[in-house]
């Protein structure tokens, strides 16, 4: 391929595809950032349930992680994307027989990625919980703190510091897993690169661009998480 045609294909404007791919990158980042707090919250409570004294909570949490860690991500996405509208439509038609339900690709992707992310994050949180000596809890209770105060003031700061490296790996996996949502027509990075590849017949070029974009996002994420980890270390030292 001539060098000029490469730059034309990667240019901005009607003759190039950079603007479309850039919009896909934005969707990828927004999807990952929208999924992160939901997945972290669910993962924390699943880990909390796994070490709870109540057997039913431990059983439910273990079933949850077994299911979403055991199913292939793509199968989970298809089940939710095609199954959730049927379930919602059945419920809605109990009240309005003529109603139809469509599930937004972004919402479906966010739900599925949150479930998958939280199942792995819960194991990271669980390991962090187990790394904190029980004396930390007892010390909090001994000075008159409630269970919530002990968790917030004593346990959580240590938990975040211990779990952070593992959560960084979960975040990198989440970034890569956003590419799965391309199969349900969400216009993220891989989807836009695939469209460009099919239209221009230059598959290697555009899939290479997609690969470089995901690699760049991973590098930037590693830099950001390293900074956060150093900040947590300095705060803990103080």
Image (cartoon, rainbow, N blue to C red):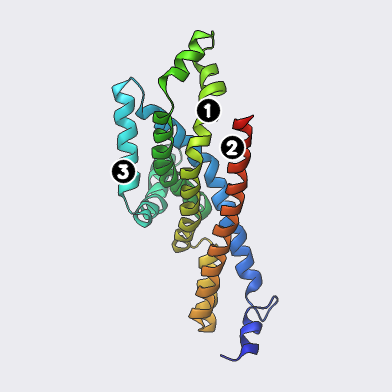
116 to the left or right of 228: left
* Helix, strand or loop status at disc 3: helix
- Say if residue 93 shows up in the picture: no
| Residue 134 % position (x, y) | 41, 20
Q: Mark 1–mark 2 contact, CB under 8 Å?
A: no
| Residue 208 % position (x, y) | 52, 74
- First in residue order: circle 1 vs circle 2: 1
- Name the one closer to the observer, 44 or 100: 44
Q: Residue at x 55, y 29 (%)?
A: 157
Q: Residue at x 59, y 31 (%)?
A: 236
- Name the one closer to the observer, 210 or 83: 210
157 to the left or right of 52: right
- First in residue order: circle 3 vs circle 2: 3
Q: CA distance from mark 1 to mark 2?
A: 14 Å
Residue placed furthest toward the right: 13
- Quadrant containing the C terminus is top right
Q: Which residue is mark 2?
A: 233
Q: Which residue is mark 3?
A: 67
Residue placed furthest toward the bottom: 2
Q: Mark 3–mark 1 contact, CB under 8 Å?
A: no
Q: Which residue is mark 1?
A: 156
Q: Nearer the viewer, mark 3 or mark 2?
A: 2
Q: Residue at x 49, y 11 (%)?
A: 141
Mark 1 packing: few (<14 Cα in 10 Å), some, or many (20+)?
Answer: some
Judge whether 25 appears above or below 7 on screen.
Answer: above
């Amino acid at each position: 391929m001539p060098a000029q045609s490469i730059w034309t294909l990667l240019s901005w404007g009607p003759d190039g595809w950079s603007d479309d791919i850039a919009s896909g990158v934005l969707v990828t980042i927004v999807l990952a950032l929208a999924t992160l707090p939901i997945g972290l919250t669910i993962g924390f409570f699943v880990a909390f349930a796994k070490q709870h004294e109540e057997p039913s909570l431990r059983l439910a949490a273990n079933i949850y992680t077994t299911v979403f860690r055991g199913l292939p991500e793509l199968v989970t996405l298809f089940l939710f994307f095609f199954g959730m509208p049927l379930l919602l439509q059945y419920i809605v038609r109990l009240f309005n027989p003529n109603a139809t339900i469509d599930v937004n690709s972004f919402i479906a992707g966010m739900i599925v990625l949150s479930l998958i992310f939280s199942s792995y994050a819960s194991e990271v949180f669980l390991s962090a919980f187990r790394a904190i000596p029980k004396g930390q809890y007892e010390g909090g209770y001994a000075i008159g703190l409630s269970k919530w105060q002990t968790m917030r003031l004593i346990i959580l700061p240590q938990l975040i510091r211990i779990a952070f490296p593992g959560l960084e790996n979960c975040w990198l996996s989440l970034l890569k897993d956003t590419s799965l949502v391309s199969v349900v027509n969400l216009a993220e990075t891989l989807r836009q690169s695939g469209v460009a590849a099919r239209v221009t017949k230059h598959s290697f070029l555009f899939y290479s661009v997609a690969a470089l974009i995901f690699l760049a996002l991973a590098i930037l994420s590693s830099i950001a998480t390293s900074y956060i980890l150093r900040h947590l270390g300095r705060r803990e030292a103080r």
